[in-house]
Image (tube, helix red, strand yellow):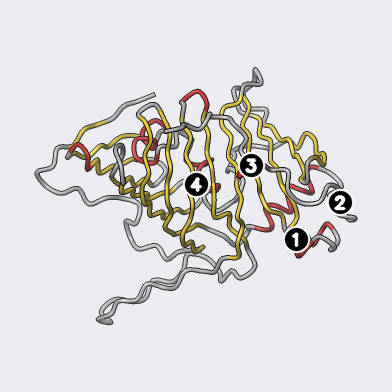
Amino acid sequence: MVLRPLLAVSLAFTLGCGAAKPPQSAMPDAKSALLRLDATYQDVTGISGSAKIDYLGDKGRVRGDVSVLASGPSRLRFAITADVVGAAGEVATDGFKFQADDKGHGRYIVGPAKPCNIARITQVPLPLEELVPMLWGMRPHLEGPIQCDSIEWADGHYRLMMSRKTPGALSHELHVTPYPADWDKPWAQQRLRLLGVYAWSSDSSLVYRVTMKDHQATSTAKPISDPDGLNPDVAPSGPVVSDVELPRTIRVEVPNKKSDVIFKYTEAFVNPPLIDNAFSLVLKEGVPVEESICE
């Protein structure tokens, strides 16, 4: 088996797509580009869908099927059925507490919603508020004032640099480009696709890289209806969305964790209805419960 180099830039994930020159009506500055990206996704509250996962890490390679339910900025339910060896189970978190059904070891794992815990099933060791929005193609959610440092056009997309003054905070590099249908529109009317996110530490080391491609238009999830009519319908968690694209292929690389994960959505819907306790598991009696305090 030939393994993927962690940071190899394959043709499948090359970001240099689109026109060599920027649109005639180009983004005037970094802040304007960030506001246009946020406006593109302003009506998206979350995602539900199914995907194929291909994970390469320190425990080998895992391929499997994944179901995803996510709601911004940090609620997630994620279940994986592994086709080969490796992780299999389900994780749910409301952004504060973490629960996992570790089917491979016949136990539940509970603890704080730290990246090290979330990664035990998702295989992605990132903070939830950064990971969750990227599951539908949005930029990471960052607390505190964001400083838009610079913007330039290169290799068919804008390279937008932003940072925070919080001690120890990462700097983020976003790669964005207009929707093809909006290329000739004034910049203030252009919707933007997110093609990549690079997170850098203060010493300029790459902390993680997320690349996105295969953007397709999506639709709003249908309400949940009780077939017996005993309970009221559960409406979508956000407005009807008809003009937003989602990346159907997302790759997450975390070099210092030797983690390399590719998600390929087979179906995806935005603003899914959320039942009570959607982001917690029902722990069955008799199954051992292990508390995980990790760093």
The residue type indicated by label 2 comes to Ala
Q: Quadrant of residue 210?
A: top right
Secondary element under disc 4, as helix, strand or loop, is helix
Q: Going by the picture, which residue comes out furthest to the front?
A: 1
* Residue lying at 77% horizontally and 44% vertically, measured from the top left: 158
Q: Which residue is mark 4?
A: 132
Residue 58 at x, y percent in the picture: 39, 26
Evaluate if marks 2 and 3 touch, with contact meaning CB atoms under 8 Å apart. no
Residue closer to the observer: 31 or 194: 194
Q: Which residue is mark 1?
A: 180
Above or below, 294 relative to 267: above
Please tell me which of labels 4 and 2 falls first in the chain: 2
Q: Quadrant of residue 114?
A: top left
Q: CA distance from mark 1 to mark 4?
A: 26 Å
Please tell me which of labels 1 and 3 falls first in the chain: 3
Secondary element under disc 1, as helix, strand or loop, is helix
Q: Which residue is mark 3?
A: 11
Q: Which residue is mark 2?
A: 26
Residue 18 at x, y percent in the picture: 76, 51
Q: Going by the picture, which residue comes out furthest to the right?
A: 24
Q: CA distance from mark 2 to mark 1?
A: 14 Å
Going by the image, does 200 lie left or right of 249?
A: right
Q: How many marks?
A: 4
Q: CA distance from mark 3 to mark 4?
A: 26 Å
Secondary element under disc 2, as helix, strand or loop, is loop
Q: Nearer the viewer, mark 2 or mark 3?
A: 3
Residue 252 at x, y percent in the picture: 52, 38
Please tell me which of labels 1 and 4 falls first in the chain: 4
The residue type indicated by label 3 comes to Leu
